[in-house]
Amino acid sequence: MAIERTFSILKPDATRRNLTGAVNAAIEEAGLRIVAQRRVRMTREQAETFYGVHRERPFFGELVESMIAAPVVVQVLEGENAIARYREVMGATNPANAADGTIRKRFALSVGENTVHGSDAPETAQVEIAQFFSGNDIVG
Ligand code: CMP
């Protein structure tokens, strides 16, 4: 199986409730390695660029506001099939539909405040990682 990297964000609802360690434990217990990590306050421009694909969606404004309301933790995760594996570990976008034991089932408050983000495909992972990390920041 292929060793991949994916991009992860622990969202403001996670940092606000001091859940960084709990979410990181779930990530590591799932066999993913945190190979880069930084706590940042996203700017409006960063959030708008990051979620640019959703610009026309009715929830775009709310999404951007929620992402800049408190610090986030941006990460690069590495492991076998890391992109799909992390999506499995996160659970469905809407916590109401998330499977038992997933991060979103355990911690998310709503579809907007859903605790974590993970890339959905290799191309997106590459773009998202590059928005926050350069080569030297990532130590596998
Ligand atoms: P994420 O995986 O970060 O990708 C886009 C985000 O948009 C998603 O998680 C949700 O937090 C958010 N989102 C998706 N659908 C809705 C919705 N109907 N209302 C509010 N936020 C949403």
Image: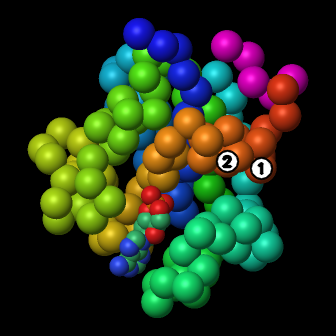
- Asked if residue 73 can be seen in this view, the reply is yes
Q: Which mark is residue 131?
A: 1
Q: Quadrant of the C terminus?
A: top right
Report whether 54 appears left or right of 87: right
User: Are the residues tagged 2 and 1 within 8 Å (C-beta)?
Assistant: yes
Q: Residue furthest left?
A: 100
Mark 1 lies on a secondary structure that is helix
Where in the figure is residue 38, as x and y percent of width and height?
71, 41
Report whether 15 appears left or right of 52: left
Q: Amino acid at mark 1?
A: Gln
Where in the figure is residue 88, as x and y percent of width and height?
29, 37
Mark 2 neighbour class, 10 Å CA radius: few under 14, some 14 to 19, many 20 or more: many
Camera-nearest residue between 5 and 32: 5
Q: Which residue position holds label 2?
A: 128
Q: Is residue 8 above or below residue 16?
A: above
Q: Amino acid at mark 2?
A: Glu
Magenta stretch?
136-140
Q: Main SS type for the magenta part?
A: loop
User: Residue at position x 41%, y 10% from top?
Assistant: 1
Is residue 129 one of those drawn in magenta? no
Quadrant of ligand 1: it is bottom left
